[in-house]
Amino acid sequence: MGLSTHILDTSLGRPAPDVAITLYRQVSSPCWTKEGEGRTDSDGRFRGFFADDSTKFQVGVYKLRFEVGQYYKQCQIDTLYPYVEIVFTVSDASQHYHIPLLLSPFGYSTYRGS
């Protein structure tokens, strides 16, 4: 079913638009291969990693890299993080994985959403 993500800037109480995101899949430790990239929409969401070919979504270890430093620079807000990487395991590729990022300039959290 694929993979989606979104970013909520909790310090501003709104979605984080136009943030660059790159998806990697671990091919062997410590090697990663780039699987896709995109930017969050006006609602802070990105759904297009496997939209064209859901058969590419497979069991394995993945990493989402969010370029949050560029986002905060555009907002003219100092941040501790130039980027955030979230590493997660896909154990059943027939399920949908939603990986949100709750973000502030000096902290973040994540969880598996629906």
Image: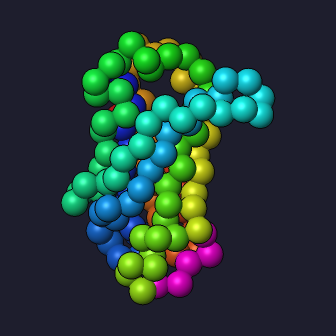
Q: Quadrant of the C terminus?
A: top left
Q: Quadrant of the N terminus?
A: top left
Asked if residue 74 is positioned above or below residue 7 in the image, the reply reads: below
**Residue 30 part of the magenta-drawn span:** no
- Magenta stretch: give its range: 77-81
Asked if residue 87 is positioned above or below residue 70 in the image, the reply reads: above
Residue 86 as seen in the image, left or right of residue 36: right
Residue 74 occupies quadrant = bottom left
Question: Which residue is outermost to the right?
Answer: 29
Task: Write the residue at 41% across / 56% down.
Answer: 20
**Residue 79 part of the magenta-drawn span:** yes
**Residue 91 percent across, percent down from the top left:** 56, 18
Which residue occupies the foreground of this view, 5 or 26? 26
The way the protein has been coloured in the rendering is rainbow
Question: Which residue is outermost to the left?
Answer: 42
Question: What secondary structure predominates along the stretch shown in magenta?
Answer: loop
Residue 9 occupies quadrant = bottom left
**Residue 96 percent across, percent down from the top left:** 37, 25
**Residue 101 percent across, percent down from the top left:** 46, 54
Task: Write the residue at 38% across / 60% down.
Answer: 19
Asked if residue 46 is positioned above or below residue 97 in the image, the reply reads: below
Residue 27 as seen in the image, left or right of residue 55: right
Can residue 17 be seen here? The reply is yes
Can residue 112 be seen here? The reply is no
Report the number of numbered marks: 0
Task: Write the residue at 50% across / 55% down.
Answer: 66
**Residue 32 percent across, percent down from the top left:** 65, 33
Task: Write the residue at 57% across / 62% down.
Answer: 83
